[in-house]
Amino acid sequence: MKGRELLAGTILRPGIWPVVALIVVQAICTVIFMGDVVTDIVPQGFGALTNPANLSEIAASSGLILGLVFEVLVLWRLLGRQHRMQQSLNVATGALSELMEGYFRTWGLTPTEADVAAFTIKGYSIAEIAGFRGSAEGTIKTHLNAIYRKSGTAGRAQLVSVLVEDLFRGALVGSAPVAKS
């Protein structure tokens, strides 16, 4: 994954700004603290390194720099992980859609039945589906009976379980049954 793609896709998300702000504040503090260390050491030369106060400032500045580098690396990894997880979710969503379409073709569902079946699988009630489709509830029930008959299932739960079982088997893409000719 390229750095620009990662930044373009994630830097605009609201949850990232507090972390970025914290890193920026820490970077500013590090620059100020390092400036103080340099102004203490430069006039005195390397002899200033024997002063315990200067050594503690150098150690603290080094700790700030290491912490800053660590925070940026962790943030970068988290953003990359989030990006990969989003891609996986997109693949799974597409795979479920392909799986459903494959089953709908195999079962010989009409476009209307496929639409009703998709809403049913998504968990919508008969009344909600009727509202979406501008149909009577009785019409939706008729379509559902045809869907259950063609799919060989006894109801909504079995219809959903057919798809879920295939997804759990692990073959997400291309696992839908092939339509009969």
Image (tube, helix red, strand yellow):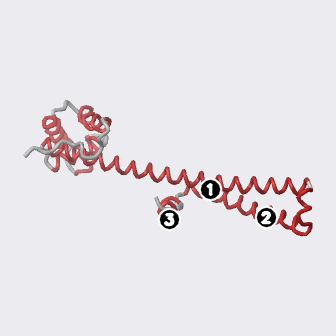
Q: Is residue 4 found left or right of 119 in the rendered image?
A: right
Mark 2 and 3 residues: CB-CB less than 8 Å, in contact? Answer: no
| Disc 3: which residue | 4
Crowdedness near tag 3: few (<14), some (14–19) or many (≥20) residues, C-alpha within 10 Å: few
Residue ranking furthest to the top: 154
Please tell me which residue lies in front, 16 or 57. 57
Question: Which residue corresponds to the image point at 23% horizontal and 51% vertical from the top-left?
Answer: 133
In space, the residues marked 3 and 1 are separated at their CA atoms by: 15 Å
Q: Earlier in the sequence, mark 2 or mark 1?
A: 2
In space, the residues marked 2 and 1 are separated at their CA atoms by: 19 Å
Residue ranking furthest to the left: 181
Question: Which residue corresponds to the image point at 84% horizontal and 56% vertical from the top-left?
Answer: 57
| Disc 2: which residue | 32
Secondary structure type for disc 3:
helix
Secondary structure type for disc 2:
helix
| Disc 1: which residue | 72
Residue type marked 1: Val
Please tell me which residue lies in front, 144 or 136. 144
Q: Is residue 33 found left or right of 166 in the rendered image?
A: right
